Image: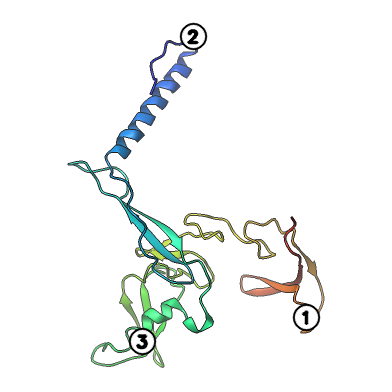
Amino acid sequence: MECCRRAAPGTPLLFLAFLLLSSRAARSEEDRDSLWDAWGPWSECSRTCGGGASYSLRRCLSSKSCEGRNIRYRTCSNVDCPPEAGDFRAQQCSAHNDVKHHGQFYEWLPVSNDPDNPCSLKCQAKGTTLIVELAPKVLDGTRCYTESLDMCISGLCQIVGCDHQLGSTVKEDNCGVCNGDGSTCRLVRGQYKSQLSATKCKTHRDGQYLDLLTCYPPLA
């Protein structure tokens, strides 16, 4: 990498300092990455449907410590589950039905949308007010909240956009189009009738249904 070429006459000193710092930063980045082995293959997805997580590992080649993370994640199996599959968090709770809690068996139901710790497995004994944390972490790929694509990975809630990418903040517009501009539908005010065509749909915000929308296919 070239870093010490003679500057042309009249080159501002601040610009020369910027070039020097940029060169040092680039070399530092290369040195940091050279301490790591290559990323390994992606693991099997934590779920077969409904959105899960997969991870890849890398090994530090230095006798000391390496800067950066040795694990990375991505989403996978981003297809809808069949209706009979049930809720993923509920499955994890019911897995404890055959394990005694204080000497007694319970049928466990999921406790969702915990604002303080959405990625712990809290379950409620059916027919009682007993709520127990049955595991400190839910399985990777469990939704943090029922009305969100954000998912729990290694016990932490990670942001997921409608494009199913980790860290993405892309959202659906009012027409249900991911990263759309709202141009593929229009408001139709009036009373809902069951015989409306299949091109009519409803939208909601904050759990409340609003006006009907007439939806059109995306423009070419």
Amino acid at pointer 3: Leu
Name the one closer to the observer, 56 or 133. 56
Mark 3 to mark 2 CA distance (whole Å): 77 Å
Helix, strand, or loop for circle 1?
Answer: loop
Mark 2: few, some, or many residues within 10 Å (few <14, many ≥20)? few
Q: Are marks 3 and 2 in contact (CB under 8 Å)?
A: no
Q: Type of residue at label 1? A: Tyr
- Judged left or right of residue 208, residue 73 is left
The residue lying at 51 percent from left, 73 percent from top is: 146
Q: Nearer the viewer, residue 24 or 110?
A: 24
Q: Which mark is residue 192?
A: 1
The answer to whether mark 3 and mark 1 are in CB contact below 8 A is no
- Which image quarter holds the C terminus? bottom right
Disc 3, SS: loop
Q: Describe residue 73's horizontal placement relative to residue 159 as left or right.
A: left
Circle nearer the N terminus (3, 1):
3
Please tell me the numbered disc located at residue 201.
none
Tell me: residue 96, above or below residue 26: below
Q: Which mark is residue 8?
A: 2
Choose mark 3 or mark 2, whichever is in front.
2
Q: Residue at x 32, y 84 (%)?
A: 96
Locate residue 147 relative to residue 59 in the image: left or right.
Answer: right
Q: Give the residue type that dot 2 points to.
A: Ala
- Where is residue 145 drawn, in percent x and y? 48, 70
Which is nearer the N-term, disc 3 or disc 2? 2
Residue at image location 81% in from the left, 72% down from the top:
189
Q: Position of residue 10 (x, y in %)?
A: 51, 7
Instruction: Nearest to the eye among marks 3 and 1: give it.
Output: 1
Residue 130: mark in rendering: 3
Q: Secondary structure at mark 2?
A: loop
* Closer to the camera in the image, 55 or 123: 55
- Residue 118: image quadrant is bottom left
